[in-house]
Image (cartoon, rainbow, N blue to C red):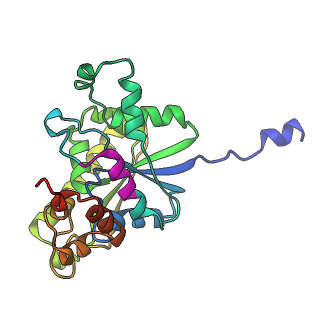
Amino acid sequence: MTDDKQHHRPKRRKRRVCLFGLSADPPTGHGGHLGIVAHLASMEMFDEVRVIPVYRHMFASKRGKQAPFQSRIQMCQLLFKNIPNVIVSEAERICFERVSDGLDEEQKESVRVGTADLLTMLITDEPNLEFTLALGADTFIDLVNGKWRRSEDVLKLVEYRIVVFRRLVEEDNASSEELKQHDEVKECIAKLQQRVDSITATTTISVTQIPSATKSDIGVSVSSSAARNTTDETVLREILSADVLDYIRERKMYAFSDFR
């Protein structure tokens, strides 16, 4: 190939990866985490959706209260196994172990690894990927309003690429709280755009509505906390996938535990 042809070769675009973090304690079904991830995976803007369970809670007072990390990883693998281009990642564990390398157990207790640390590691390890954060509406509002640790660093590291997901609600049926949240998301996008304009960067923020509901057909709240606190299998089948429910029951987790 001549130098001239090499010069005009089109630049290959980076592989686009959507990052979705969750506690996965436990991960919920179609009305929750499964519906969100399936929707993200169906969006043509991403080549991959990377599901990243929390390894270690940021606050010491809440540590030790979650199910073991590997159990939460395995439940996510069961839940998302049939969705193409979805990867369950142990990135948070790897990031914590790198940051705390060489420290004793007492020193590790004071280590706080946040989203900015995780993004720095991912970008360093995989420079040819383009990362986007997927955030719920309330979480996005908190990030833009500076309530996260190193909020501005997080925004800059993903180069202001964010997908904000909201529950699909008909405007006529929306509650005052949902309408308020909708307005706050719009205000935060405008605020972020003003901030970005001042540094001559660009934003790629999209808002998507998830067609799955937060309540099941029988009125059950689809949440991890609801799943943790009942052994009623009629309720649990509304909240969890069959594979995740079997996993929990067989290992006597949460309300099935002999130690409750």
Q: Measuring 18% from the left and 57% from the top, which residue is drawn there? A: 257
| Residue 248 in view (yes/no) | yes
Q: Name the residue furthest front.
A: 258
Q: Quadrant of residue 214?
A: bottom left
Quarter of the rendering occupied by the C terminus: bottom left
Q: How many labels does the image show?
A: 0
Q: Measuring 46% from the left and 63% from the top, which residue is drawn there? A: 81
Residue in front for this viewpoint, 74 or 159: 74
Q: In which quarter of the image is residue 153?
A: top left
Q: Position of residue 123 (x, y in %)?
A: 49, 35
Residue in front for this viewpoint, 177 or 191: 177
Q: Where is residue 80 in the image (x, y as percent from the top left)?
A: 42, 63
Compared across the picture, whether 90 is left or right of 178 comes to right
In the image, residue 53 lies in the stretch drawn in magenta: no
Q: Position of residue 165 (x, y in %)?
A: 31, 60
Magenta stretch: dominant secondary structure: helix
Residue in front for this viewpoint, 238 or 153: 238
- Vertical placement of residue 52 versus 76, above or below: above
| Residue 198 in view (yes/no) | no
Q: Position of residue 243 (x, y in %)?
A: 36, 68
Q: Name the residue furthest right.
A: 2
Residue in front for this viewpoint, 122 or 102: 102
- Vertical placement of residue 78 versus 3, above or below: below
Quarter of the rendering occupied by the N terminus: top right
* Extent of the magenta region: 67-76
Q: Measuring 40% from the left and 46% from the top, which residue is drawn there? A: 203
- Vertical placement of residue 230 versus 218, above or below: above
